[in-house]
Image: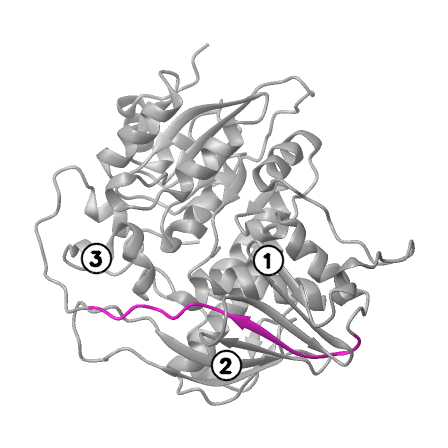
Amino acid sequence: MDTRLSRRRFLAASAAGVALAGLPQLRGGLSAAAEPATYKRRKFGPNDLINIAVIGPGGSKGGFKQGLHDTQSCANHPGVKVVGACDVDKGHLDEAAAAFGADCRKYTDFRELLARKDVDAVVIGAPDHWHAYMAIAAMKAGKDVYCEKPLTLTIEQGRQIVRTWRNTGAAFQTGSQQRSDANFRHACELIRNGRIGKINRVEARLPGGPVGGPFEVAPVPADLDWDLWLGPAPFNDYVKERAHGTFRWWMDYSGGMLTDWGAHHIDIAQWALGYDRSGPVSIEGSGKGPDPICANCYDTFPDFDLDLTYANGVALRVTNKGENGVHFQGDDGWIFVARGKIEASDPTLLESPLPSNAIKLYESNDHTGDFINCIRTRKQPICDAEIGHRSVSACHLCNICLKLGGRKLSWDPAKERFVDNQDANALLSRPARGVWKV
């Protein structure tokens, strides 16, 4: 029996008020959170085929195709087949479908794809402002999820993702692939085991962000569904620089370099310090903000220097100064780790083996392979939904601090609220356009 839905059948079912795996109706209707959800998943044997699909593959036209790359990496593992692709840009969609062959069906609306009962898992590579909506709907539809970082647009969205993840039992991998790199894991194990003594300070050194604009309003390309690309984001006329790879430099869709690279390096810093399921207790700093009166200009923070302080007293400096990577300073030396590189004040700090009773961290040497394995075993991957949420939450705290002028803010990581600061707490969530809710 073919369980795949045609668009006509899907629309007919939606119009009749039928709840399809807890998904909102196309172009209107209830939100995913308001409808009943189905969490049933297939059980997989070691040789059973896993059907996956990609939402937001990206493509050559936009110059960025992380979703396509992640999906190809998943498909390289035995027993995995790509059966669907979804993108609001026809050029990107055609490119993805061509990469995966005739059995890969094409969709422009992710809710149609999620209604397929034969799709076991999805890779989400859409822009950041879509992550929470797609991930929550996918988990409620019984799918396991690989979602690119940064996981969310707001802290409240992350709380909703974690709640749904716990309720549904989905295998959930955040695309923070540095966790599956041996150098980063080795650095974190050395820090956890006191190799450089008591940690005094950590620096997450990120690139600086771009400045640009004003950009010109242009006609919407014929092959792009601009309204659905915007989705829950505020309506804006089409500007080429708002879409595809440069969406990162607009607060409506992302958080600039603080969330783009920050989600990687802050994640590693918190993993090493043992706060990857918690967070800091205060934040303060400074940054160079965008021009507030420039319409259609990039509006994320290009320059920043902030301190996040944790309950053990260690300060994590988040800055766009210095070599890209994470630097740990302890009483007995320092360790620096970056992509393809790990260094120490004394090379023997890196070479001497840890004792047999040392703290050992989750070992993954293949981020997508770890996800596929967890679909079969029903375990959780190395960067599950809560870890992904806590990593990007620290990034969001940075942006909130800068929006409020850089003054010191107290944060309660258990309640996930600012302490006695209504202005800051008002920035934990954002209104959504139209029917979109999480």
Disc 1 versus disc 3: nearer the observer: 1
Q: Read off the residue under disc 3.
A: 241
* Residue at the extreme left of the image, as rendered: 219
Image quadrant holding the C terminus, namely bottom left
Q: Is residue 33 above or below residue 322?
A: above
Question: Residues in magenta?
Answer: 197-212
Quarter of the image for residue 290 reads bottom left
In the displayed structure image, the side of residue 235 where residue 361 appears, left or right: right
Q: Badge 1 local density, few (<14 within 10 Å), some, or many (20+)?
A: few
Between 106 and 256, the one lying in front of the other is 256
Q: Position of residue 300 (x, y in %)?
A: 33, 71
Query: In the image, which disc is placed on residue 282?
Result: none
Q: Amino acid at mark 1?
A: Lys
Disc 2 versus disc 1: nearer the observer: 1
In the displayed structure image, the side of residue 312 where residue 38 appears, left or right: left
Q: Secondary structure at mark 2?
A: strand
Q: Read off the residue under disc 1.
A: 341
Q: Read off the residue under disc 2.
A: 306
Q: Is residue 49 visible?
A: yes
Between 170 and 79, the one lying in front of the other is 79
